[in-house]
Image (cartoon, rainbow, N blue to C red):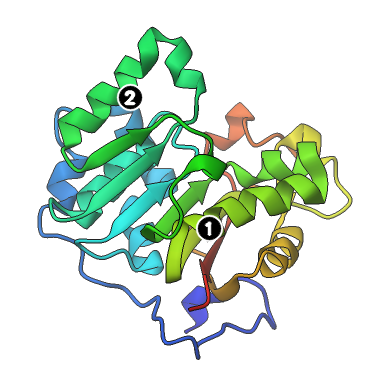
């Protein structure tokens, strides 16, 4: 139990009928992450981002439909594709910006190479509602809160809420900040603020994992500071849409 408690005194909600205990990923999960077709830059980030441990905490299962929110370069798209297997599906939500670069061909090629991925060139509020068993957003939430305040924070979280099926789960992962610090400049957000906003958006908090903790990061430098090697201290909430 303690491995899922990040802050002393934080009550993990275990009465939701949903376990975050480790689940068996597909037998070929590790092999797929090491495939020659996966970019070396993605592989290099695995040590810090811990794909296997992260998905075991979230509890993603083969055959699920999962949304990669603000998919960026597709690191999580690869990982989720390997986790849900050929019977599952990943909606990789890239937004409209990639369409400005060769009509999103790089993202379309990525999806085609994985076989169970559908690239989505729309904002999250235009994603189909109630389709996903799970969703993942990593290192995106801080921008919604820092640049658009509570209104932006709630819009971001409610878009994730809406894409989930009743009872669906989501991982909300971000660079942890300190209350009162210049988190906007540091590209961080305090876990306490994220927790408050998550609950306000209607989610239940299943657990808060320490799997992405990095004690070497004291939250005083930018999340992109070279001294961190992209291995920031990150909070990791597993949340559930009631249903």
Name the residue furthest top: 102
User: Who is closer to the viewer here, 168 or 51?
Assistant: 168
Q: Residue at the spot x=59%, y=75% of the render?
A: 204
Image location (x, y in percent) of residue 48 = 44, 45
> Alpha-carbon distance for marks 1 and 2?
24 Å
Disc 1 versus disc 2: nearer the observer:
1
Q: Earlier in the sequence, mark 1 or mark 2?
A: 2
Image location (x, y in percent) of residue 69 = 47, 44
Image location (x, y in percent) of residue 70 = 50, 38
Of helix, strand and loop, which one carries label 2? helix
The reply to whether residue 88 is in sight is yes
Q: Residue at the spot x=25%, y=32% of the render?
A: 111
Is 134 on the left or on the right of 89, as rendered?
right
Residue 107 disc label: 2
Count residues near mark 2 (Cα–Cα under 10 Å), then give few for <14, some for 14-19, many for 20+. many
Image location (x, y in percent) of residue 176 = 67, 51
Is 211 on the left or on the right of 74, as rendered?
right
User: Who is closer to the viewer here, 192 or 102?
Assistant: 102
Count residues near mark 1 (Cα–Cα under 10 Å), then give few for <14, some for 14-19, many for 20+. some
Q: Is residue 174 above or below residue 64?
A: above
Q: Residue at the spot x=66%, y=73% of the render?
A: 7
Residue at the spot of label 1: 162
Of helix, strand and loop, which one carries label 1? helix
């Amino acid at each position: 139990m303690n491995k899922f408690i990040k802050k002393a005194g934080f009550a993990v909600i275990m009465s939701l009928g949903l376990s975050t205990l480790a689940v068996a990923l597909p037998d070929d999960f590790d092999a797929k992450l090491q495939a020659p077709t996966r970019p070396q830059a993605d592989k290099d980030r695995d040590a810090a981002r811990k794909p296997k441990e992260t998905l075991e905490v979230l509890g993603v299962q083969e055959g699920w439909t999962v949304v990669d929110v603000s998919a960026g370069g597709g690191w999580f798209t690869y990982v989720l594709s390997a986790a849900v297997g050929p019977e599952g599906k990943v909606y990789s939500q890239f937004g409209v910006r990639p369409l400005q670069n060769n009509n999103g061909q790089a993202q379309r090629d990525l999806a085609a190479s994985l076989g169970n991925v559908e690239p989505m060139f729309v904002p999250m509020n235009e994603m189909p509602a109630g389709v996903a068993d799970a969703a993942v957003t990593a290192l995106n939430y801080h921008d919604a809160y820092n640049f658009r305040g509570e209104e932006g924070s709630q819009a971001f979280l409610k878009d994730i809420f809406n894409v989930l099926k009743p009872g669906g789960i989501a991982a909300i992962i971000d660079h942890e900040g300190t209350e009162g610090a210049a988190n906007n400049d540091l590209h961080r957000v305090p876990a306490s603020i994220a927790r408050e906003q998550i609950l306000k958006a209607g989610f239940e908090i299943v657990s808060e994992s320490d799997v992405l903790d990095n004690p070497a990061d004291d939250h005083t430098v930018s999340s992109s500071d070279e001294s961190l090697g992209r291995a920031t201290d990150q909070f990791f909430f597993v949340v559930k849409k009631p249903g």
